[in-house]
Amino acid sequence: DQQVKQNSPSLSVQEGRISILNCDYTNSMFDYFLWYKKYPAEGPTFLISISSIKDKNEDGRFTVFLNKSAKHLSLHIVPSQPGDSAVYFCAASDGGTGGFKTIFGAGTRLFVKA
Amino acid sequence: NAGVMQNPRHLVRRRGQEARLRCSPMKGHSHVYWYRQLPEEGLKFMVYLQKENIIDESGMPKERFSAEFPKEGPSILRIQQVVRGDSAAYFCASSPGVQSQPQHFGDGTRLSIL
């Protein structure tokens, strides 16, 4: 049962343009969402998060949008840089500000072309 | 390096042997989580531990897998009588508290079963 889905296995974007990564979830109890970035042979690194009481959170070039009615969130990276090339995981949890069980999507591999 | 430390980075075992994966959490963190990543898949939650306690092991296979986090020393994920299907990357994460996000990840142990 995939509670967190990232339907695009990969995405290719030109340097300087916007990258949009999408994520859908099915569990309406999720109230905290995170994006992690992962380079090969390394562990995931936290990128940005959003609580369900918000619909947008911005940190520099990264913005996460949450649409609770559609159970959908997206990560926007603008402008995209070659160093952004990595696998991006969407994750969700319930229990206030988090919870001990975090559910991850399968990831989207982003390629940023110079 | 005050991050989450996992060792070994790579572990090769023959079918039927035992595998022991170690994880030292970040300084000040007393909560440890183990995840497994199969090829082309996301991270699957396995177990959540605090010092000397297993809090949630709902993601652990019922047989051959066990985890501990003793009062002194690292957390250990133990796989007995390994099979080829155990080949995966195993990631450990830590946090300072049960309701604390984000989790901080180590670089993983890549387990290969011959």
Image: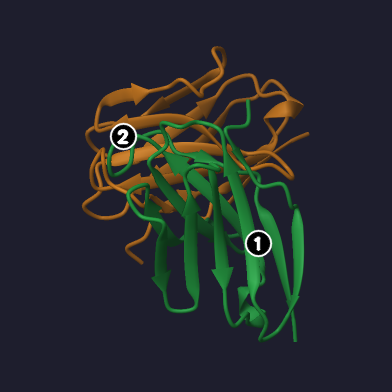
Q: Earlier in the sequence, mark 1 or mark 2?
A: 1
**A94, above or below B94, in the image:** above
Task: Specify the label residue A95 is tagged with.
Answer: 2
Q: Quadrant of residue A1?
A: top right
**Which chain shows up in green?**
A
Foreground of the two, A91 or B23: A91
x 52%, y 38%: residue? B35
Lateral position of residue B48 relative to residue B52, left or right: right
> Which residue is labeled 1 in the image?
A40
x 74%, y 45%: residue? B40
Chain at numbered mark 1 = A
User: In the orientation shown, which residue stands out farthest toward the front?
Assistant: A69
x 32%, y 49%: residue? A53
Percent position of residue B27, x then y: 25, 55
**B36, above or below B53, in the image:** below
| Colour mode of the rendering | by chain
Disc 1 to disc 2, C-alpha distance:
31 Å
Residues tagged by mark 1 and mark 2 found on one chain of the structure: yes
Foreground of the two, B72 or A71: A71
Lateral position of residue B93 relative to residue B10, left or right: left
Foreground of the two, A73 or B79: A73
Lateral position of residue A50 relative to residue A19, left or right: left
Q: Quadrant of residue A30?
A: top left
**Which chain shows up in orange?**
B
The three-letter code of the residue at mark 2 reads: Gly
Q: Quadrant of residue A40?
A: bottom right
Of helix, strand and loop, which one carries label 2? loop
**B34, above or below A58, in the image:** above
